[in-house]
Structure formats: C-alpha cells, structure tokens
C-alpha cells in the first residue's frame, strides 16, 4: 500500500510539473530587458512610457513555478526635451514588474509585483513569487513606473509582442 501511495504521489508531482510547463510553453522565461523607445507603444493593456528611456543593463526571469526576478541598472530618461532631467529617472521613484500574458483575449496584464524603489541612477531589483494564470502563454515581462504615486506605463520589457 505504501508503494502504491508513493507511486501515485510521484505521478501527481510529474503531472503538476508538466501542467506548469505547458502554461508558459517553456521551462524558464529569461531575457534581457529593452527600454521603452517612445510614447505610443502599448504592450497589451499596459501603456507605454511618456518619453524615451534607456537602460544600461537589465534582465528578467520567470520560472513556471512563478519565481519572478528582475534586475535593472541605469534605467533613465533618454530624451533631450526633458532638460536637466535627461539621464535621470526624473519623478519615477519606483518600479513594479508585471507579467503580460497572451491568452484567449489577447495580451493582458497578469500578476504584478509590489513596487520597489528606483534609485536616482536608475537601479532596482525585484525578486518575488507570482501566480501565473493557467491560460498564460508567451509571457512578456514589463517593468512599470510608479509616477506621482501611481503605477502607470512600462519603461522596459523582455520583448515587444
């Protein structure tokens, strides 16, 4: 009886792993981040940045278990029209990472991290666990700005859908 229970437990574990992997279509989503080039390029229902941004370096990783890790360095404005604010995060004081999922109704925001501080040099690290919706395929990870106390558009992304 104990052997039967162990076998059933092992099968249940494998089925769970296979189901998680099929949610995203891959074992791990890991990619470099690219900065928002200009206004008007929404990703799903996440609006784009108001001005052009640049990033020194950045990576994002999402595992089938929902571990979300994002690291950005030098995420700052790249728009001469901002005057002295160019090369800084200006009024953006924090960022959140969101998983934008492709599902039955197009690209929609799925789980999102809490906001973490963005340093004056544009650095931030996010490490959290999120619940990935069962119909989430081709996930895109976006770094969203907190500006004037509200989480708004995206500043960096793993890809443009």
Image (tube, helix red, strand yellow):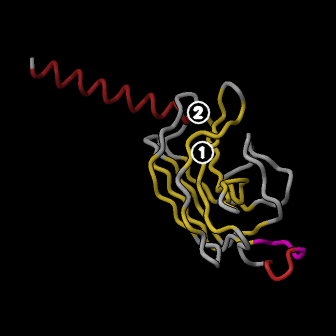
Nearer to me, 147 or 74: 147
> Which residue is disc 2 drawn over?
136
Q: Note whether 62 is above or below 71 in the view shown.
A: above
Residue 89 lies, in percent from the top left, at: 71, 72
Q: Is residue 75 magenta?
A: no
Kindly indicate the quadrant of the structure image that contains residue 5.
top left
Q: Which residue is mark 1?
A: 99
Q: Which residues are magenta?
A: 77-81
Q: CA distance from mark 2 to mark 1?
A: 9 Å
Residue in view at x 78 percent, y 53 percent: 48
How many numbered marks, from 0 up?
2
Considering the numbered disc 2 on the image, is that residue within a helix, a strand or a loop?
loop
Tell me what residue is drawn at x 73 percent, y 53 percent: 153
Q: Within 10 Å of the Cα at label 2, are there few (<14), some (14-19), or many (20+) other Cα atoms? A: many
N-terminal label among 2 and 1: 1
Q: Whole-percent x and y of residue 21? A: 48, 34
């Amino acid at each position: 009886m104990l052997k039967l229970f162990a076998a059933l437990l092992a099968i249940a574990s494998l089925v769970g792993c296979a189901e998680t992997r099929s949610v995203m279509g891959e074992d791990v989503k890991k990619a470099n981040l690219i900065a928002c080039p200009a206004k008007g390029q929404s990703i799903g229902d996440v609006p784009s940045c108001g001005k052009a941004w640049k990033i020194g370096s950045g990576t994002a990783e999402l595992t089938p278990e929902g571990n979300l890790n994002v690291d950005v360095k030098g995420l700052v404005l790249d728009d001469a029209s901002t005057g002295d604010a160019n090369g800084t995060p200006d009024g953006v004081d924090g960022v959140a990472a969101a998983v934008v999922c492709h599902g039955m109704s197009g690209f929609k925001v799925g789980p999102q991290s809490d906001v973490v501080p963005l340093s004056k040099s544009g650095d931030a690290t996010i490490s959290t666990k999120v619940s990935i919706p069962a119909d989430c395929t081709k996930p895109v990870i976006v770094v969203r700005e907190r500006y004037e106390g509200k989480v708004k558009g995206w500043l960096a992304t793993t890809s443009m859908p």
